[in-house]
Image: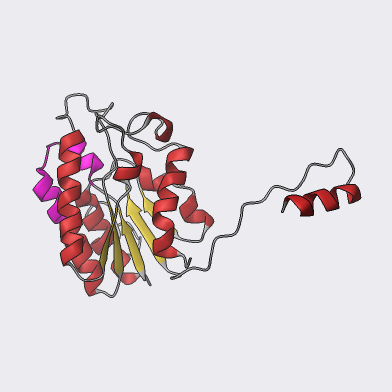
């Protein structure tokens, strides 16, 4: 590649910078992919760049996600959006639990209840022909908007273990472990990978993409 640039440089004016481009990704394994989640999903630019549907929304809990799956809305009232079950979906990437742990639903559910919500979403989705990529909850040592919330580090590890065990026993559910690649030695997110201890930086999203890519693209 460096020889190619060198040989072509004589044909370009010295003031003309080389073109910038991103290396192409391998062919897609599947075409119809929906990402369901909270603000971490909403902020992941990779999703729209490759034509996937981004149904992430800030502050949402796993209970909201059940409503979005079944009713098309985050809440039970009519909103005009199609339920995910009515969409043509081959793969559902499901990431939730952070806002549950933070108490965004006005209470602090147990990790077992959060895992059950995510398992129920996965089971309903697979019964409708989808393959579920069940994402780990990302590491966090606290929630800056809910400082009174119980320290989440150990609860996240416990929740992820439950999700991994469920996926291992289920049919058409794959656990995607982002946590291991993003965590630091005290259970929070590595500083280079986060903007505020919870949300993900561009570098962090790059790590997540490298973890996810084998599940969506041929090698």
Q: Does the rendering let one see residue 83?
A: no
Q: Position of residue 194 (x, y in %)?
A: 39, 33
**Residue 115 magenta:** yes
Camera-side residue of 7 and 188: 7
Q: Residue at x 21, y 50 (%)?
A: 62
Q: Does the rendering let one see residue 86?
A: yes
**Residue 106 magenta:** yes
Image quadrant occupied by the N terminus: bottom right
Camera-side residue of 107 and 168: 168
Q: Residue at x 26, y 45 (%)?
A: 137
Camera-side residue of 202 and 210: 210
Q: Residue at x 36, y 32 (%)?
A: 190
Q: Which residues are magenta?
A: 97-117
Say left or right for 176 vs 109: right
Q: Position of residue 189 (x, y in %)?
A: 32, 34
Q: Is residue 51 above or below residue 156?
A: below
- Residue 164's quadrant in the figure? bottom left
- Residue 182's quadrant in the figure? top left
Residue that extends furthest to the top in the rendered view of this protein: 147
């Amino acid at each position: 590649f460096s020889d190619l640039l060198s040989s072509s440089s004589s044909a370009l004016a010295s003031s003309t910078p080389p073109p910038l481009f991103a290396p192409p990704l391998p062919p897609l394994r599947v075409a119809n992919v929906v990402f369901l989640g909270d603000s971490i999903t909403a902020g992941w630019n990779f999703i729209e760049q490759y034509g996937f549907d981004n149904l992430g929304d800030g502050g949402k809990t796993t209970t909201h996600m059940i409503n979005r799956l079944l009713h098309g809305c985050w809440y039970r009232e009519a909103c005009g959006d199609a339920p995910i079950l009515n969409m043509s979906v081959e793969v559902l990437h499901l990431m939730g639990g952070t806002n549950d742990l933070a108490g965004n639903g006005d209470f602090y559910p147990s990790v077992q209840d959060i895992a059950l919500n995510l398992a129920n979403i996965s089971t309903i989705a697979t019964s409708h022909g989808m393959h579920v990529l069940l994402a780990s909850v990302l590491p966090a040592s606290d929630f800056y908007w809910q400082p009174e919330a119980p320290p989440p580090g150990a609860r996240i590890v416990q929740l992820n273990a439950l999700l991994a065990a469920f996926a291992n026993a289920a049919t058409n559910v794959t656990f995607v472990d982002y946590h291991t690649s993003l965590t630091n030695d005290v259970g929070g997110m590595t500083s280079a990978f986060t903007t505020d201890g919870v949300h993900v930086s561009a570098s962090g999203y790059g790590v997540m993409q490298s973890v996810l890519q084998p599940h969506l693209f041929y090698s």
